[in-house]
Image: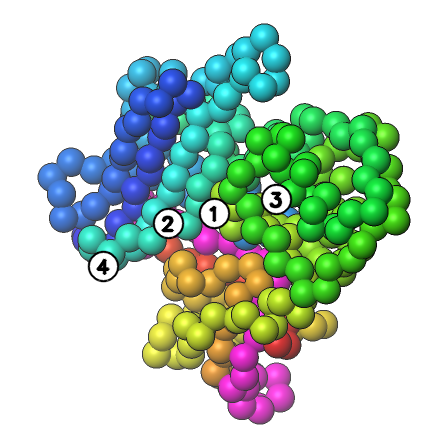
Amino acid sequence: MKQFLRNIEVMIESPDGKVKVFSHNPGEAIHFSIEFEVEFSGTNITSVTLYNVLNSTVGMCVPKEGKSKKDSANAKAELSVGYGDDLTLIAKGEIIQHNVSMKGTDRILEFKISDMVNKLYAYSLTETFEKTLVSSALKQIFGKYGISYYSIRISDDTLLDSITFAGDSLSVAIDRLAKLVKAKRYFKLGKLIVEDETWSKNNQSNNVPLLDRTSGLIGTPQKTKSGWKVQCLLNPLIAKGEPVHLSFTDNTTGSKIDSQYVVTHGAHRGSSRSSDHITEFECKVA
């Protein structure tokens, strides 16, 4: 069974720069068994399982231990999914833990990918910022701790009189500054983003995925306090903070739902060993 030509590809890069790519492409003679779960929430933890890989592959996942935190480095990984040769990157980050186990004759490598979780919680900040903009304070923190892949999306920057961090983790410090400009911190494909709601509303993508009976919607969405809980065929366009258009009939009330919503959180899940490649998420009124 070709599973509708679904393709999964995993790239692993060791701390010293060696790269291996594993794929499950039904169109190829050799392919690996791969399972994954990609969260798009506050932590963005991705779980990947590879079956029957070599010891050298396991070794690539081992972090480099240095004399100091700055000298240490984690392995990196990327996960792409799609149909045939049309692949989309859905997860990218550092390998924060890995494990090898046996199940019958299968040797299983499991690892987790995260967006700078170690860096955000491993470092503490002791510093005072005075007479500076919130955006400037954030940039100074990012520069000091080697965070180069970020985006600050603030509609109304604020001039700080004085703010002191006394041993706060980077995560806490960034969140405190973000709160001052009514913004939130999140990650997307390895990028640290500080974004407020006004910026988000004014810069929504024009490429809004439509979910109905003919375009991947599975079953009937369940009503929540603020919107809907939805299941659909795996759709890489669906991500935290992005718009989605739902069109279906509510079984409870019989009313027709045909409106745009904003994704709050969810996950992509799939396995080369089954036909289930799905996206589950919750959304609220846009």
Going by the numbered disc 1, the residue's amino acid type is: Leu
Closer to the camera, 162 or 51? 162
Give the SS element for disc 1: loop
Disc 3 and disc 4: Cα gap in Å? 31 Å
On the image, numbered disc 2 is attached to which residue? 89
Q: Tell me if residue 45 comes above or below residue 262 in the rendering.
A: above
Q: Nearer the viewer, residue 84 or 94?
A: 94
Q: Position of residue 142 (x, y in %)?
A: 63, 38
Residue annotated with mark 3 = 43
* Three-letter code for the amino acid on which mark 3 is drawn: Thr
Q: CA distance from mark 2 to mark 1?
A: 8 Å
Q: Where is residue 196 shown, x and y percent of the image?
A: 68, 62
Left or right: where 184 falls relative to 53: right
Q: Main secondary structure of the magenta part?
A: strand
Q: Residue furthest front?
A: 131
Q: Which residues are magenta?
A: 249-276
**Residue flagged by tag 4: what amino acid is it?**
Phe
Residue at point 48% right, 37% down? 93
The tag earlier along the polypeptide, 3 or 4, is 4
Residue 181: name its quadrant.
bottom right
